Image (cartoon, helix red, strand yellow):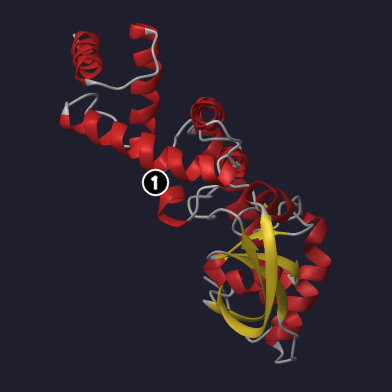
Amino acid sequence: MARDTGFPDADAGYDFARLRRQAERARLAQWFTRQPADVNTILPFDEVVAALGATGKTVLGLQVVEVSSIVGSVDRTKDFDRYFRPTSSRLRERWQRIAAAQRRGESVPPVQLYRVGSMHFVIDGHHRVSIAIARGLTTIDAYVTEIHTRISPEGINAPSDLILKDHRRLFLSRVPLEGSQAEAITLTDPFDYAELAENVEAWGFRLSQEVGEFLSRTEVARRWFGEEFLPVVRMARRAGIRDDLTSDAELYMWVACERYRLVRRHIWDEKVFDELRNHSLRRRR
């Protein structure tokens, strides 16, 4: 909790030292509990946007922003941790000077932020955000620019989560599904997205040969989802195959791979699903 003795310089020094202790304790706790190395790492804006695929931006102007939503930085990823606690004493002088000025009632300009989904990334004002956290403030004034992305940023909690988003973005560039169709394809292993994309492209190639004309990626994606993915998932669910798989995309991948391994044909019929169901039951024993 921030201290307020009426002596701005002393209180600012106390707040900085407290945040530094918290940062070191968090680092040690991460090490002792064997948490992922990036659990306390601030999110890098450039890497997040690269993984999600930027499609445009909108200048929103002056906003009141929840401090807890500020989780990343454009260019100061080494100076602060995920909770904007200073990572070294090198920042002390400037940090305390700004903090003391605020305590004396001096005005400070709003910070500048990028917004990606519900997350905010600091362009300018890292010290001010850190000081707001030290003082227990819940909101901060900010000039905000919203970044629009190809895929949803939901689920990003640490830099290690970006690989899954990056592979999903690449999948959707190869299989350009939109809206609810894109949302229906969720995988937990990032490398499964590449395998599924190859599966769809192979299906599209066979379809092009069948109809005797070239089909665009958009047309292949649309027809694959409606003519292949949905029917297969429905039949697999009705047959009780791999009830342990809650993701329809992961269920589809399993039955598609096992179908070809077992029967060596790209067809779906009751005989195939009977074989898959029996194989699934044997697998659980």
| Residue 186 visible | no
Where is residue 23? Give x, y as percent.
62, 51
Where is residue 67? Give x, y as percent.
56, 71
* Number of numbered discs visible in the structure rendering: 1
Q: Residue at x 49, y 30 (%)?
A: 207
Answer with left or right where residue 138 lies relative to residue 277: right
Q: Amino acid at mark 1?
A: Ala
Circle 1 residues within 10 Å: few <14, some 14–19, many ≥20: some
Answer with left or right where residue 86 lies relative to residue 275: right
Which residue occupies the foreground of this view, 157 or 31? Answer: 157
Vertical placement of residue 180 versus 126, above or below: above
Q: Residue at x 62, y 74 (%)?
A: 132
Q: Residue at x 25, y 21 (%)?
A: 269
Vertical placement of residue 173 versus 10, above or below: above
Where is residue 268? Give x, y as percent.
30, 22
Q: Residue 146 occupies which quadrant of the picture?
A: bottom right
Vertical placement of residue 162 versus 154, above or below: above
Which residue occupies the foreground of this view, 134 or 241? Answer: 241
Which residue occupies the foreground of this view, 121 or 47? Answer: 47
Answer with left or right where residue 228 lies relative to residue 208: left
Where is residue 40? Give x, y as percent.
59, 47
Q: Residue at x 39, y 46 (%)?
A: 184
Residue that numbered label 1 is attached to: 184
The secondary element bearing badge 1 is classed as loop
Answer with left or right where residue 66 lies relative to residue 127: left
Q: Residue 247 occupies which quadrant of the picture?
A: top left
